[in-house]
Image (cartoon, rainbow, N blue to C red):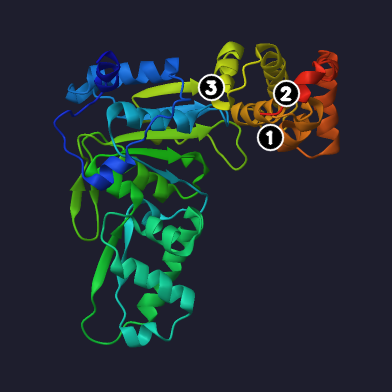
Amino acid sequence: MKDQNKQEQYVLSPTRELTDDERDLVWKKPLTHKESEEERRICKEIKRNWDRSELKIANILLEGDAGSGKTQLAKALSANFKLPYTKVTCFADMDKSDIIGAILPVISPDRMKKLETVDQVALKALYERDNFLSSTEILMEALGITQEMASAKMRQLLKLAADNVEDGVVEYRFYASEIVRAFQKGYLLEIQEPNVIRDAAVLMALNSALELDGSLNLPTEIVHRHPDFIAVITANRSYAGSRPLNEALRDRVQHTEKMDLPTKEIMIERAMAKTGYGNHEVLDVLANIIIILDKTARANAIKGVAGMRSYFYWADAVARGASARESLYHKVIYKITTDSEEIKLLEDALEGHGLLGILEELPIELKKNEI
């Protein structure tokens, strides 16, 4: 009962009934999930202010290092608030249709047969699906492509369908974006890397979706922000192609967390939970190396990142018998950079702290440990 009460303490709309599809979108915390200080703080703040209209907190910014747990935190909020989780990953050439959605003409079966097979598959998938999925999701599923490729494909299909409509009455269908779907239905939406978007008009459209009492003018209707809609913006610092986060967008955020590498003890605790590997001494050495590499990469303007993901995969490899020294390169250093001069800088930093020698001195039975 105590665990049940803990799970329910942050539910924002207890009387809300989700559909089966929506319940499937609520994130389920794995057993390895460790509640962070940031998670507790955000949940308490949102719950405390949820019914205070002018002080409501519903736009969150998580800004920090790659691999610092931003997406994991966004998903944990979905689980705590019992809200369906969805996401959109921004890219440089996004246009307004990626924010709002698009109107697509329906072409006749005869015209459809003359198109390339992949275009037929894509159009049929769009025409046959209901509006529960966004157009991007439908194309990703039907064609097995990435979100960015699906957005580009949708733009191509718009032109293709427009060129193949027949004279006379034309049927049009509107396909909402993932952002509009979350905005209208009251989901928790993670907006990944909006700081890579180039077009100011796209950013303006995104800003409109973040107004607490906002509405969106769609081609078919005006939709209002659902009271349960929460936007979680996740942005990497010093990420290739990124820019400073748009000031107007930042101004619409009511709560921000600076996401850095966690403390070493928390790193070790999370690695134990993720990998099932319990040797604190070894994990301590690996964590020290990750921390030094992270600091060295920053100090030398090396673009790659030594973060928690690298730490987990490296610890898991070592736990399963890999050489800690050899797997350091494949799991961590080469992920940061493959440039010889930059690798030498990283190696020198580790040598200066005596950490490469310590890797060699790990008890031999740990390296042979088979799990």
Q: Which amino acid does label 2 sit on?
A: Leu
Q: Mark 1 points at which residue?
A: 304
Quadrant the C terminus occupies: top right
Residue 63 is left or right of residue 162, and the answer is right
Q: Residue at x 39, y 80 (%)?
A: 163
What amino acid does circle 1 point to?
Gly
Q: Which of 56 and 110 is in front in this view?
A: 110
Q: Residue 131: x percent and y percent?
A: 26, 58
Residue lying furthest front: 370
Residue found at x 62% / y 17%: 278
User: Quadrant of residue 105 in the image?
Assistant: bottom left
Badge 3 amino acid: Ala
**Residue in the image at 68% along x and 13% along y:** 284
Total label count?
3
Q: How far apart are marks 3 and 1 (CA)?
A: 26 Å
Q: Is residue 250 visible?
A: no
How crowded pointer 2 is (Cα within 10 Å; few <14, some 14-19, many 20+) is rated as: many
On screen, residue 222 above or below 194 = below
Q: Which residue carries the number 3 mark?
A: 273
Q: Which mark, by number, is residue 293?
A: 2
Q: Up-down: is 12 above or below 36?
A: below
x and y, in percent, of residue 171 in the image: 23, 75
Quarter of the view holding residue 266? top right
The numbered dot on residue 18 is none
> Is 52 in front, or is 311?
311
Find residue 189 and report its horizontal and vertical position in percent: 35, 39
Left or right of residue 86, residue 222 in this image: left
Q: In this view, does 15 lie to the left or right of 298?
A: left
Horizontal side of residue 72 vs 112, given as left or right: right
Q: Which of marks 3 and 1 is in front?
A: 3
Question: Of callouts 3 and 2, which one flags the residue occurring earlier in the amino acid sequence?
Answer: 3
